[in-house]
């Protein structure tokens, strides 16, 4: 599970907070659009916790400007597969929201897109971004799948004889 160390919850009232599936947290001081984020990660989408939990909601459009003070999630499209249950999505939303509230994010004053023509070549994935180099103190976390605890069921005979018992006595 992910772990982070913080003496007080971080304030995101003036920042856009983006939480990746891995638990990596980014804070953007400037307005940023969804397309600026998803251009770097074409197999991902951006949504809020409400959108993740609502079965009829869609991910945010590319031209949507992310609002300061809100928490957004960047998730792979594979999360939306048919075999993912609503319980799994609720667990994921809870975990990512908790991480967003307690972890100090990577504060990027210019954002990762500081070049004039869009994307900066300084990093192309959360694993190579500045926060992964020690700025953010946490390890990636995973949702633990539910596994039942099973015990052996022992069957008992109720004084009934089997066919093999009848053959032995004849």
Image: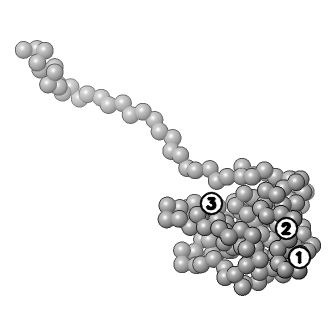
Which is more N-terminal, label 3 or label 2? 3
Q: Picture coordinates of residue 9 (x, y %)?
A: 86, 63
Residue with the most extreme right position: 109
The residue positioned 77% from the left and 81% from the top of the image is: 33
State the residue position of label 3.
91
- The 10 Å Cα crowd at callout 1, few under 14, some 14 to 19, many 20 or more, is few
- The 10 Å Cα crowd at callout 3, few under 14, some 14 to 19, many 20 or more, is some
Location of the C terminus by quadrant is top left
Cα distance in 3D space between marks 2 and 3: 34 Å
Q: Which mark is residue 49?
A: none
- The 10 Å Cα crowd at callout 2, few under 14, some 14 to 19, many 20 or more, is few
Q: Which mark is residue 115?
A: 1
Q: Can residue 147 be seen?
A: yes
Mark whose residue sits in front, 3 or 1: 1
Instruction: Name which quarter of the figure residue 31 lies in.
Output: bottom right
Between residue 10 and residue 41, name the one nearer to us: 41
Instruction: Name which quarter of the figure residue 61 lies in.
Output: bottom right
Instruction: Name which quarter of the figure residue 117 lies in.
Output: bottom right
The residue positioned 38% from the left and 34% from the top of the image is: 153
In this picture, is 109 found above or below 84?
Answer: below
State the residue position of label 2.
121
SS for tag 3?
A: helix
Between residue 166 and residue 34, name the one nearer to us: 34
């Amino acid at each position: 599970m992910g772990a982070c160390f913080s003496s007080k919850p971080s304030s995101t009232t003036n920042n856009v907070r983006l939480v990746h599936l891995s638990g990596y947290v980014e804070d953007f001081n400037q307005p940023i659009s969804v397309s600026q984020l998803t251009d770097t990660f074409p197999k991902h989408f951006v949504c809020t916790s409400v959108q993740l939990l609502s079965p009829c909601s869609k991910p945010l459009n590319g031209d949507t400007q992310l609002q300061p003070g809100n928490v957004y999630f960047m998730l792979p499209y594979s999360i939306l597969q048919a075999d993912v249950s609503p319980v799994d999505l609720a667990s994921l939303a809870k975990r990512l929201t908790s991480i967003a509230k307690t972890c100090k994010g990577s504060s990027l004053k210019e954002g990762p897109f500081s070049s004039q023509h869009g994307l900066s070549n300084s990093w192309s994935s959360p694993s190579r971004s500045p926060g992964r180099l020690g700025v953010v103190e946490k390890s990636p976390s995973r949702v633990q799948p539910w596994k039942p605890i099973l015990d052996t069921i022992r069957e008992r005979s109720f004084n009934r004889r089997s066919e093999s018992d009848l053959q032995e006595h004849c």
